[in-house]
């Protein structure tokens, strides 16, 4: 029998606001809520600690492997998962573009909240993440930056080089447009991601919306408007 417990999906081209909300819900509702950060789930499915390592180890084969893992994640949601708890899923930017995403939407009918960012904000976040990734890896690698290929990086003889801002913004804008057509448009609510991080009142409203759809209490969530 298919699990009919509530499912809420957070989508965003940039992941900072998604991660922040997932961490808070996991911290306060970990016992009665299933929280999945798709990046970690997909990496674990493939036997790695994170998706960057998939690219570092598998190179050009990584995108196809990740798409296959996405199918497994979407099927897991469609099959009702393993328990009866509500599910809060933080999608990767490309998950809504997977062909199986539309089938999952039709079958599960989740509540989808899209945290919208403009291309300049997305570029800033991607460049900040690149600096953090570089610091964590700590040494040159031919596949470093492959996960941002055709966004803020492009292939070169030494691996992947950082694009100039004008070229990166153009590619980000185009990818956002394609993702809006393929999956982002299917959300029920669109909110600006930036106030979700910066404005406690705005964040409280967003948390109340998510909690209401999941049918869980909001009282223990810090900063929530009761």
Image (cartoon, grey):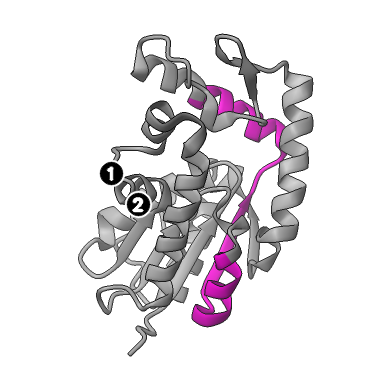
What is the quadrant of the N terminus in the image?
bottom left
The answer to which of marks 2 and 1 sits earlier in the sequence is 2
Q: For residue 33, what is the image quadrant?
A: bottom left
Relative height, residue 48 to residue 188 (above, below): above
98 or 83, nearer to the observer: 98
Residue 208 included in the magenta stretch of the image: no
Residue 47 image label: 1
17 or 69, nearer to the observer: 69
Q: Nearer the viewer, mark 2 or mark 1?
A: 1
Q: Residue at x 52, y 41 (%)?
A: 63
Q: Are marks 2 and 1 in contact (CB under 8 Å)?
A: no
Residue 112 included in the magenta stretch of the image: yes
220 or 101, nearer to the observer: 101
Q: Residue at x 66, y 59 (%)?
A: 184
Residue 41 image label: 2
Q: For residue 5, what is the image quadrant?
A: bottom left
Q: Secondary structure at mark 1?
A: loop
Q: Which residues are magenta?
A: 100-129
């Amino acid at each position: 029998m298919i699990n009919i417990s509530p499912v809420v999906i957070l989508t965003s081209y940039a992941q900072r606001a998604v991660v922040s909300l997932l961490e808070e819900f996991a911290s306060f509702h970990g016992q009665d809520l299933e929280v999945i950060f798709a990046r970690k789930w997909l990496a674990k499915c493939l036997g790695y600690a994170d998706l960057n390592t998939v690219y570092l180890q598998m190179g050009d084969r990584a995108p196809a492997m990740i798409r296959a893992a996405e199918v497994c994640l979407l099927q897991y949601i469609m099959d009702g998962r393993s328990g009866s708890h509500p599910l809060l899923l933080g999608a990767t930017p490309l998950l809504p573009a997977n062909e199986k995403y539309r089938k999952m939407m039709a079958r599960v009918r989740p509540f989808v909240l899209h945290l919208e960012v403009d291309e300049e904000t997305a570029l800033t976040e991607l460049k900040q993440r690149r600096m953090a990734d570089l610091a964590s890896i700590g040494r040159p690698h031919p596949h470093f930056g492959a996960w941002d290929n055709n966004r803020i990086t492009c292939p070169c003889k030494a691996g992947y080089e950082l694009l100039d801002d004008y070229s990166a913004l153009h590619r980000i804008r185009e990818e956002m447009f394609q993702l809006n057509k393929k999956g982002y448009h299917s959300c029920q609510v669109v909110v600006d991601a930036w106030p979700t991080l910066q404005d406690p009142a705005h964040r409280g409203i967003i948390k109340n919306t998510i909690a209401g759809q999941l049918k869980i209490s909001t009282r223990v969530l810090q900063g929530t408007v009761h």
